[in-house]
Amino acid sequence: MQTVNRLIALREAVESLRADGEIALVPTMGALHEGHLTLVREARKRAARTVVSIFVNPTQFGPNEDLDAYPRRMAEDSRLLEAEGVDLLWAPTVEQVYPAGFATNISVSGVSEGFCGAARPGHFDGVATVVCKLFHHVLPDIALFGEKDWQQLAVIRRMARDLDLVQPHVERILGVATVREADGLAMSSRNQYLTPEQRSQAAALPRAMRAAIAQIEGGGDVAQALIALEQALLDGGFSSVDYAALADADSLEPLSLAPQRPARLLVAARIGTTRLIDNMAVAAR
Ligand code: PAF
């Protein structure tokens, strides 16, 4: 596996990989876990060559968020990617991505506004801007993202559609199913912030979500199911719930009645100072 930190070296490396066939990109912020490695394995099945980026993107963190504390483990990440057969690791510096005087922002309205967009102002502008840049750096044929960040995936697809991105074309921006721990907790780099007690309490999140989905799919009242979900989280040790909502899977329009089209149950809740997010499919009736 080749590792490059400068754009000029990246362009050369990508050009030589392109001679072998299609290129898949897996954008990450590092601190890799099984969820990321699942994306890499899927990428390797779908393309001749796989590029992974590791960049802790400062513009998607709010002023009081965990940018400084965000885990950085380049040596270990690099070993994991090498073992997975990744061809190229793109690990740019902040100065490479945001040169002095950087003044451009991509802001996707609509899908980015509710849920995490409302709770974390500017977050999705940072995500859209950096992902657009990473796409331009690598010009991948395929890009893969975890479905755990469902809203992020919707924002990236909207951006790709609206900006007529060719590489990757919006149809080739793939979501990969969330990878879960044995107790159902979605894998996340932020799970490592949890104390052992909080870690065991965190399993209340997928449990409460499954119960709410069973209620909604069984014809129960949506508002009641969401109230019960929030209460189960608070009873289970969560300190607060940012949102618990049912939304259309594509437009992310909130739904107050049992869905007629595929929907998603979306939740963000805090356990201590750690904010966990999750989402699950809710079948249409
Ligand atoms: O999901 C992430 O890890 C990040 O938001 C991404 C897509 C790599 C952009 O920084």
Image (spheres, grey):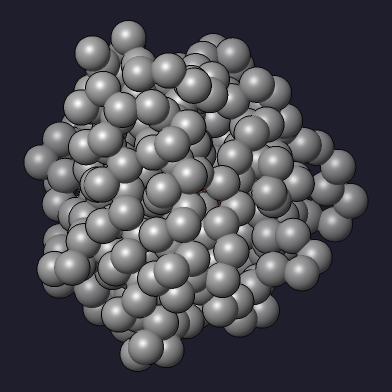
Q: In which quarter of the image is the N terminus?
A: bottom left
Query: Residue, x 72% and y 30% (percent of image)?
Result: 107
**Snapshot quadrant of residue 106:** top right
Residue 275 in view: no
Q: Where is residue 229 in the image (x, y as percent from the top left)?
A: 40, 50
The residue lying furthest to the top in this view is 260
Q: Where is residue 118 in the image (x, y as percent from the top left)?
A: 70, 41
Residue 264 in view: yes
In the picture, measured across the screen, residue 245 lies left or right of residue 264, that is: right
The residue lying furthest to the left in this view is 45
Say which of 246 and 122 sits in front: 246
Against 114, residue 275 (above or below) is below
**Snapshot quadrant of residue 149:** top left
In the picture, measured across the screen, residue 124 lies left or right of residue 217, that is: right
Say which of 121 and 69 sits in front: 121
Against 143, residue 230 (above or below) is below
Say which of 279 and 239 sits in front: 239
In the picture, measured across the screen, residue 17 lies left or right of residue 234, that is: left
Q: Position of residue 169 (x, y in %)?
A: 40, 19
Q: Quadrant of the C terminus?
A: top left
Against 87, residue 253 (above or below) is above
Query: Residue, x 59% and y 64% (percent of image)?
Result: 240
Query: Residue, x 59% and y 40% (percent of image)?
Result: 115
Say which of 188 and 185 sits in front: 185
Q: Where is residue 55 in the image (x, y as percent from the top left)?
A: 53, 62
Query: Residue, x 59% and y 14% (percent of image)?
Result: 162
In the picture, measured across the screen, residue 3 lies left or right of residue 65, that is: left
The residue lying furthest to the right in this view is 101
Against 162, residue 215 (above or below) is below
